[in-house]
Image: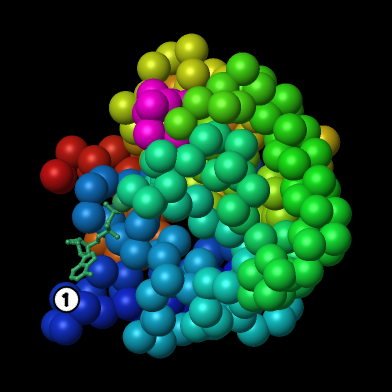
Amino acid sequence: MIKVENLHKHFGGFRAVEGASLEIAEGSITGLIGPNGAGKSTLFNVIAGVLKPTSGRVTMQGEDITGLPPHELFHRGVLRTFQIAHEFSSMTVRENLMMVPGEQRGETLWNAWFQRKQIRDDERALLKKADEVLEFLTIDHLRDEKAGNLSGGQKKLLELGRTMMVDAKVVFLDEVGAGVNRTLLNTIGDAIIRLNKERGYTFCLIEHDMDFIGKMCDPVIVMAEGKVLAEGSHDEIQNNEQVIEAYLGT
Ligand code: ADP
Ligand code: MG
């Protein structure tokens, strides 16, 4: 699905990503782990178009997508979740989902604002879709809650829900489990597995919780110092000398 070749991202003289190469197989839930500062988030941001690479190449199903801006990647189904922006915290959960433009809509959604009939049809479709997403994620009881009142884990579910408002193909999740309680983490995990199995989403997850990685991810890719150190199953990774050393070294 996604192939990263010899990717570099330097910030001034600092080499956050230094020649990383990896592949994310279609239909996989690939884990990305590594010590703090390994370059994981930077790599995600380069793939998802948030940062331009210094050099290297990213392809999607053989097509060059290196350095494409986020909205173009969005239309190709490449999504990275973002925290709910402050401006959206006073909107309800359902309204937050509806803010995500549907495929090919973008600006026209706003033009259509003045075309009452059009907007009413569009809105009905969006409402229906948002309600389906809420039900799928088992958070329909939070439909009319203000996003700002959600717990950390519920916000993560909402972020995941936004990827379901469009036809995502590959979704990048950066530390989805951080600060989330066990119960909600399981709900998030179940949603990811169902999206993978039932809707064919490919996932790449950055995660620190090794239990979660073990339960969810195959393969697991390990990064250290801007490079890919190892790749394998959860068990292989855990018994890899270089990996153990990289973690102990920090
Ligand atoms: P990880 O997600 O693996 O913890 P990051 O990709 O966030 O690592 O960061 C890798 C390194 O790059 C860190 O040392 C970090 O301080 C540095 N870094 C990240 N973003 C920037 C930036 N915008 N400017 C300068 N240095 C950065
Ligand atoms: Mg990070």
Is residue 145 at least partly visible in the picture? yes
Query: Residue at the location (43% across, 47% down)?
Result: 88
- Looking at the rendered structure, the number of numbered marks drawn on it comes to 1
Where does the C terminus fall, quadrant-wise? top left
Query: Residue at the location (64% across, 48% down)?
Result: 98
Please state which of residues 169 and 13 is positioned toward the viewer in this rendering.
169
View extreme (top): residue: 183
Give, as a three-letter code, the residue at label 1. Answer: Phe
Q: Is residue 88 above or below residue 212?
A: below
Q: On the image, which quarter does residue 108 sit in?
A: bottom right
Q: Is mark 1 within 8 Å of ligand 1?
A: yes
Side of 119 where 186 appears, left or right: left
Side of 162 where 84 appears, left or right: left
Question: Over which residues does the magenta segment extend?
Answer: 147-155
Q: Residues within 10 Å of mark 1 (few under 14, many from 20)?
A: few
Query: Residue at the location (44% across, 52% down)?
Result: 82
Where does the N terminus fall, quadrant-wise? bottom right
Q: Is residue 13 above or below residue 85?
A: below
Please state which of residues 67 and 7 is positioned toward the viewer in this rendering.
67
Q: How is the image coloured?
A: rainbow
Is residue 221 at least partly visible in the picture? no
Counting from the top left corner in percent of width and height, residue 199 is at 80, 42
Please state which of residues 20 and 142 is positioned toward the viewer in this rendering.
142
Q: Is residue 43 above or below residue 137?
A: below
Query: Residue at the location (69% across, 46% down)?
Result: 164
Counting from the top left corner in percent of width and height, residue 114 is at 71, 70
Counting from the top left corner in percent of width and height, residue 117 is at 85, 60
Which residue in the protein does label 1 denote? Answer: 14
As for residue 152 lying within the magenta part, the answer is yes
Q: On the image, which quarter does residue 55 sit in?
A: bottom left
Query: Helix, strand or loop at disc 1?
Result: strand
As for residue 154 lying within the magenta part, the answer is yes
